[in-house]
Amino acid sequence: MLTWVALLALVLFSGTTYVAARRKVSAAAGGSPRNMHSLPGYYGAYVALWAGAPAALLVLLAAMFGGRLEDALLRVQPPAAVAQLTPAEQQVFFDDVRATAHNLQASETSYEGPMQAALQAKTAQARQLEALIAYGSVAAAAVLALSGVFLALRRIRPDFRARNKVEGWVAGLFIVCSVTAILTTVGIVGSLVWESLRFFHAVPLQDFLLGREWDPQIAMRSDQYASKGAFGAVPLFAGTFLIMIIAMIVAAPIGLFSAIYLSEYAGGLSRAVVKPLLEILAGVPTVVYGFFAALTVGPIFRSGFHALGEALAGGPLNSLALYLMSVQNQMALVAGAVMGIMLIPFVSSLSDDIINSVPQALRDGSLAMGATRSETVKKVVLPAALPGIMAAMLLAVSRAVGETMIVTMAAGLQAKMTINPLDTVTTVTVQIVTLLTGDQEFDSPKTLAAFGLGLTLFVVTFLLNIIALRIVQKYREQYD
Amino acid sequence: MNQRQFNQPLRHRDDEGAAAPAVHIAVDRGHSADKSAAIKIRARDVNVFYGDKQALFDVGLDVPERAVTALIGPSGCGKSTFLRCINRMNDTIPGCTVRGRIELDGEDVNDRSIDPVVLRARVGMVFQKPNPFPKTIFENVAYGPRIHGLATGKAELEAIVESSLKRAGLWAEVADRLHQPGTGLSGGQQQRLVIARAIAVSPEVILMDEPCSALDPIATAKIEELIDELRNQYCIVIVTHSMAQAARVSQKTAFFHLGKLVEAGPTGEIFTNPRDSRTQDYITGRFG
Amino acid sequence: MTDAALPTAQPSLRQTVEARLKRRHAEELRFRFYGRAAIIVALLFLAVLVGRIVAQGYTTFVDYQLSLPVYVDPARVQVDDLSGANYDLLIADQTLARLGEKDDELGTQSGKLMELISTDLGFQVLEKVKADHSLIGKTITITGPVRADGQLYYKGQMKRTTDESERKLDNQQLAWLDRLKAKGLVKGGFNFGFLTKSDSTEPEQAGVLGAIVGSAMMLLVTASLAIPVGVLAATYLEEFAPKGRWSDLIEVNINNLAAVPSIVYGLLGLAVFINWLGVPRSSPLVGGLVMALMALPTVIIATRSALKAVPPSIREAALGVGASRTQTVFHHVLPLAMPGVMTGAILSLAHALGETAPLLMIGMISFVPGVPQGFTGAATVLPVQVFIWENASERAFEERTAAAILVLLTFMIIMNMAAILLRRRFERRW
């Protein structure tokens, strides 16, 4: 709240300084812009920036990191009763301190004797620290703002190169914004690698990558049964791969053929109708596909297979019939098929772009030889577009591997190594969701495993994307 | 050289309807002194529309067998459009309609009974920019024979490829790299490869749409030489920007202007003794 | 120069070509059929998907409301302990009497009747009596929804013909429902509650308002971060940055970021925003931050292509009259590119609106009854609401899930239409 008030005050203040600076420089120049180096607005902006920007940055930093600072300061000298606790218990204690200080729900730990005294003492300290940080940062920001205005106002004279200075600020802003993209990547890689390293500290890398058993149900207490857990991710990779293959079997031919039809055969009108419809299909959120898979496709497939099983029962294929009668809604086939539907417009629009960038001259050359359209497509256009289409397929594979909601809602949780599409499998993304949506403490290998899986997923999709984007770039250069 | 009795003006047919535009009379003075020379393509009253825009107006032209006919005129005059009517390449352009009659050996190419596939096998085409397929040199030349099933075995196909490349004057340069990409050749070589690709199906007519405009002078000379040799076996129609080229390679020249055929006749005569002032202006460089 | 001298290949070429023609044209037709079939299949999937969700969800928008006179019995409601009274039982008993039934000693009958009346009615009595103690001893009329299973029966989704043991309500309960309706105490109408209430554990009281507000707040955060940062970054890369290894690296990086699985952004948000920076879990703020990072590459790519479409002559003209590069870009190039930029921005926000997976990572999956309290309070958003309801076991949530999807799709279609209109209205061809 204080942050917002401070920011609002800063905005008003720097607005005032803008006007003041304009007035000052106009008066100094005798009211004529001709005597100034820059337009009056630039002088205003220069002063307003010095008034607002550093102070606002300080306030924001305090809001972002104030809590961490408070936490760190609280822990500097823990009371003796707290110091002898285990790190985990200390964590609980300090969490409770903060919760009490903010009048939030604390844990159910009961504190007695010296511990209660410590809690009260620390709670009081926490409140003090919080106020100190909040008001201290606002006070510091006020000092910054005032001194910024003071210095900036002294510098502006009609011959001051205000425009260049303001443009310098703008250039800085530009670079900060551009670096955000890089920082995002650094953040992704950094956080995944950091947390994964902690995970691989508990579970060796080769066990994770090569292990064939996945059973992350670790007990909360070390004396419980099955506290070890198993973190062999191979079954997850197998499940992801199986669903991806099914999805591509659906999406690749349908997507490619619709792209061919749209770019080589369809007239302007049907293109104008079909393309937006496919865009709608592409815009449908994945959670909707998940719902469709779980409540429509799954039951239909299951009852279909059950009916088939009943028809075959008693015959020579009795064992198959019994199996068909036992399949569940959460088949790999269901998740894969629905994911395939989701990917159709993706494959189609990428392939459409690629096919359209094959030069018309090649089509003309082939048609002028007396080739039919389909011969032209099959023997000239598609071979020419092949690298691009391969890249489009790789991007689709990358999407399929990273897709989460459909599999979370329609695939199962059982980690199984199978190539049977009627079986229930689980995927990397399903496990990430499962591991992180329960109530767990953050540091257990179980939650850290999610980051190990996330890192694997990121590396795989990153490689697929880089290769695909490279191919597309090369391909475009070839025909530009 | 002047064969006046051949110069029957080609009139706009009156039976086309009362709404027909003002009659435009194109003058076709034939192509040579030899009045017995066969006419391969006979075009009458050809009108072409791109949507609402008319690109050709009542064009009538006779194209002789085993000779080179050059279509000249300023850009946008419709000469390429006319060329593309002959093998019905205009079919591939959405919104393009062709009216009138174009006869190949007396058969209307726009007739329903004529399959464009067969027509285009008989009428080959070479484009402005060399457009070899992204395949090997061999596969480029073998493309036509393969799709039309002209060779019964591998040996026959190889023979066709070799003879086509030889006739296109490219064999010596590519014999040792037949299985390398055709796109790796130089511009002039690519254009000769495309010509070889066209003659591999033994067409009767070859259409060339400014085949040298993307080439340097040396490559141009080679192509012109090749055209001169091919003239003995094929009916060739060439669209060109360069009047010098038309004068060098063609026996008959037709001058197009603003979608109309202004004048056509033996090349020498068109260049030395044009009848129409527009032709005169164009060949003397007053516009173009 | 006679015809006889022509190569004999002429007729043979024609014959050879024609001999194979039939087969080639059949192949052509077959190929064209494959293409057409692919399109039809794709569109069929779309039709089935949308049709099925409409069929599942439309019943949500019909709602059966009970209007009951309730005598606030002073014997059961004490002024000093208003919250201690069992209003559900009070209502059930009186309704039972109105239906002419007697309760047994165990309260089985009133218990069965309570299964038909939403607890919402009891809450309403409590609220009214709390506000006005004088109501005790009087009769007040309250209106509230029939409970979810009863709604299913009225909508024909629970059938009398189903075996009694296989449905939630027994024959007597169905008979009561029929009689309540016959007495005119139950009326069907448009379900405004679905759009004006928030999540609830009781299906008949659950609505999407909280999720809509949550989505709007999250998108506000996303838009106010992703659009300015994305536009400035794209402008810098396109107009100012020297072309070289550095800009190539950023370019590759942005293209790659656009293809990173969304769940990875969720992991980033969990590790960086929540655990490192201490942004509150489940809040629209953290959701908006994650979505902003996800939308950023799309906004940058869209802006760059819009900037590329502005012809260089505009820049040259502005520079030529003495404008600085910054002035040229801000006064001339960016305004001209704005329609393209806004189209891209709206589309990326529409995408963010439908995104679910990363939000599960940052705790937006929790049950939030009510409209979110501020940007740092707990919230849920539409797609996550869909996910939560899809997981709920009550059958009545199924139609609500589909209806929530319909609401979500409506918003997405509105945003897409806005983008299309913007593009049509301001599209400029140079």
Image (cartoon, helix red, strand yellow):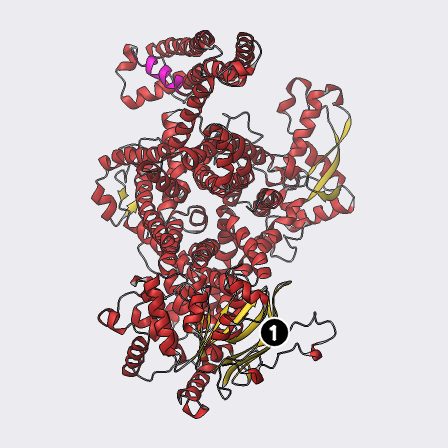
- Badge 1 element: loop
Q: Is residue A117 left or right of residue A305?
A: left
Work out whether residue B201 or residue A85 is closer to the camera in this orientation and state it: B201
**x and y, in percent, of residue A216 in the image:** 31, 42
**x and y, in percent, of residue B70 in the image:** 47, 72
Work out whether residue A430 or residue C292 is closer to the camera in this orientation and state it: C292
The residue at the point 72 percent across, 39 percent down is C66
Q: Quadrant of the N terminus of chain C?
A: bottom left
Tell me if residue C1 is in the magenta stretch: no
Judging by the rendered image, the residue that carries numbered circle 1 is: B26
| Amino acid at circle 1 | Ala
Work out whether residue B266 or residue C195 is closer to the camera in this orientation and state it: B266
- Asked if residue A21 is positioned above or below residue C228 in the image, the reply reads above
Q: Give the quarter of the image for residue C278.
A: top left
Identify the magenta region.
Answer: A65-76
Instruction: Characterize the magenta stretch by its predominant secondary structure.
Output: helix
Residue A50 visible in rendering: yes
Residue C379 visible in rendering: no
